[in-house]
Amino acid sequence: MKYADSKVVFREIPDEVTLAINISNCPVKCPGCHSSYLVNDVGEPLDYAALSSLIESNPGITCVSFMGGDGEPRLIHEFAKWIKSTYKGLKVGWYSGRDLDNARQNLDVLDYVKVGPFIDEYGPLDNPNTNQRFYAVTQTPDGPKLEDWTKKFLKKFI
Ligand code: SF4
């Protein structure tokens, strides 16, 4: 797995200061992809050393979000689990381009998940017509529980 770049962002995960790690080699191939550079095999290897360096060089973050990584979802699971055990209190999100059924395998280690491909005519999360969904994940004795937070992205329209 490689990442093209990373950035601290404020809107991608509501109410969190998030280190977004943009993962390349995206296999989803959405027509009209908004980040075509992430489709290519570009960037640096993402491993535990790179992850800890990224996290520790961004003090003040409350969340780490993997933006992509659908080619290696089990690695996303391993990284998310490691972050939560190594950096107590730090939350973890995953922006997947696939559907919720595909993301279920990782819900036990996530606090947030975005699912759904990018479809130009429906737009991203802040478009009222979006096909994508954003969920907050709570771990319960019965398994991960999802709350649909997609509407939080529409605040600017209200
Ligand atoms: S999931 Fe994102 S990066 Fe991948 S093809 Fe779709 S829009 Fe592009």
Image: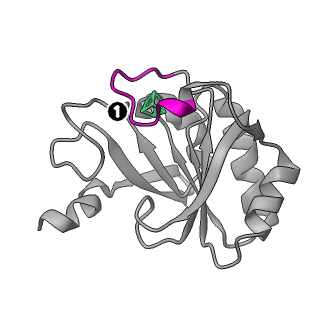
x, y percent for residue 18 = 55, 65
Q: In the image shown, does 112 or 58 lie closer to the viewer?
A: 58
For mark 1, does the 10 Å Cα neighbourhood hold few (<14), some (14 to 19), or many (20 or more) residues? many
Q: Amino acid at mark 1?
A: Phe
x, y percent for residue 21 = 62, 50
Quadrant location, the C terminus: bottom left
Q: In the image shown, does 51 or 101 lie closer to the viewer?
A: 51
Q: Residue at x 59, y 59 (%)?
A: 7
User: What are the residue bounds of the magenta stretch?
Assistant: 28-38
Q: Residue at x 34, y 33 (%)?
A: 118
Q: Residue at x 79, y 69 (%)?
A: 56
In this rendering, the answer to whether 61 lies above or below 102 is below
Q: Is mark 1 within 8 Å of ligand 1?
A: yes
Q: Write down which quadrant ligand 1 falls in.
A: top left
In this rendering, the answer to whether 62 lies above or below 141 is below
Q: Quadrant of residue 115?
A: top left
